[in-house]
Image: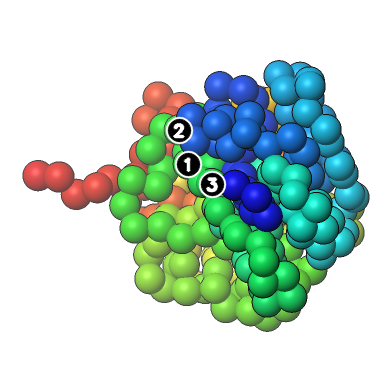
Amino acid sequence: MENAIYIVGIGPGREEFLTGQARTALERCDVIVGYSVYVELLRAFLPDKEYRTTGMTKERERCRLCYSLALEGRQVALVCSGDAGVYGLASLTYELSGEYPGVELFVVPGITAATSGAALLGAPLNHDYCVVSLSDLMTPWETIARRLRAVIEADFAAALYNPSSRRRADYLRRACDVMLAAGASPERACGCVENIGRAGEQTWVGPLCELRERAVNMFTTVFIGNSTTFIQNGKLVTRRGYR
């Protein structure tokens, strides 16, 4: 289709994590646009494509580049890790669409870190859950803290994205302190996964009081159990309530 952008979630980035729909969209497009780290993951198994990249914090420029290419009649894929609609660029691309009325948008879902990481840990999100990003780049910390308190007060299981960076080295500890102050038990079952589906993949499960002391990074996804979650044979399990 001419003058179209496919906003594609590529999952963790390894070929076997691509959905069939995502692979079809990528094969249909002749130019793939994305953050440089994610583009390099695709080059290994889609070497014949034309790639355009932008760096971190250049998301708006990346979206506008896609619109420019689409208006030239190119078949364009804008790729995001995980799912494009979960902390991805689907929303920003739609926000800009009023400036480019001749371009159609198609969102192609991908496997997000909450579900791919949960599968590695066992079944931590098997009941009601929510997803919270600890990055305060676009969300004030006060809002993040309010949402973390709500996780405990409503007894949700939760997946925490973006738990740390060089500038935010203590944010996971701060998040744990917020949840402990909201009434979470220090023994609440938790876990984390680093480098899901990539080299260096590793998992950990343990109590909230130990999670507070763990070193994590931007490639880590953290899982907070609810009050029924337990650890069994090294796996994190949240009860669904079957009787």
Task: State whether residue 182 is above or below residue 39.
Answer: below
Quarter containing the C terminus: top left
Q: Nearer the viewer, residue 180 or 43?
A: 43
Residue 88 visible, this angle: no
Q: Disc 1 to disc 2, how far (Cα)? A: 6 Å
* Quarter assignment of residue 119: top left
1 or 3: mark nearer the eye: 3
Q: Position of residue 103 (x, y in %)?
A: 66, 62
206 over 155 or under it: above or below: above
Q: Can you say whether 162 is above or below 96 in the image?
A: above
Disc 2 marks which residue? Answer: 119
Cα separation, mark 1 vs mark 3, equals 16 Å
Q: Residue 228: where, in percent of width, then height?
A: 32, 51
SS class, disc 2: helix
Left or right relative to 82: residue 49: right
Which residue is under mark 1? Answer: 115
Q: Earlier in the sequence, mark 1 or mark 3?
A: 3
